Amino acid sequence: MKTGKTLAKLPKNYRMLLLAKRAELSSSLRTKLETLSATGGAALEDMAPVFSDQFTALRINRLDYLQLKLVEAALARIDSEEYGLCTDCGSAIPSSRLDAIPWAARCIACQELFSSDNDSGFPDDSAQLEEMSA
């Protein structure tokens, strides 16, 4: 693989960006736990808004967790000197893509193939998350 040459071309701020994003997501996950644990002492018929808020918080929490996993995987690729290389084809990921999505694991062409392969009625959350990020 083209590890040394590719990493030398990458700005060193990607690690800082990823660490900041990891801290932001970790903080967000902790904050949402408060929403999930707050049920209050209301009557059952008055709980609909609370349940709705909890459902929304759970869904956002799941997306944040999946994004955190993508960020941690990118940090692991930095440590293994594979950051900036597409995990599918091995070619360099354009710096403009990494500037926009520092945790991107695929080049644009492979991401488009991945997204079209997962374009079912029920996309999995990681594919949905990468599509949202792209």
Image (cartoon, rainbow, N blue to C red):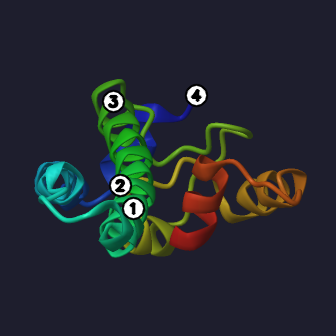
Q: CA distance from mark 4 to mark 3?
A: 16 Å
Q: Nearer the viewer, residue 52 or 17?
A: 52
Q: Residue at x 79, y 51 (%)?
A: 114
Q: Please, what is the three-letter code of the amino acid marked with disc 2?
A: Asp
Residue 62 pos. (x, y %):
42, 49
For label 2, the residue is: 64
For label 3, the residue is: 76
Q: Nearer the viewer, residue 17 or 56?
A: 56
The secondary structure type at the circle numbered 1 is helix
Q: N-terminal of the two: label 2 or label 4?
A: 4
Q: N-terminal of the two: label 4 or label 1?
A: 4
The secondary structure type at the circle numbered 2 is helix
Q: Are marks 2 and 1 in contact (CB under 8 Å)?
A: yes
The secondary structure type at the circle numbered 4 is loop
For label 4, the residue is: 1
Residue 91 pos. (x, y %):
66, 46
For label 1, the residue is: 60
State left or right for residue 11 relative to residue 120: left
Q: Quadrant of residue 69?
A: top left
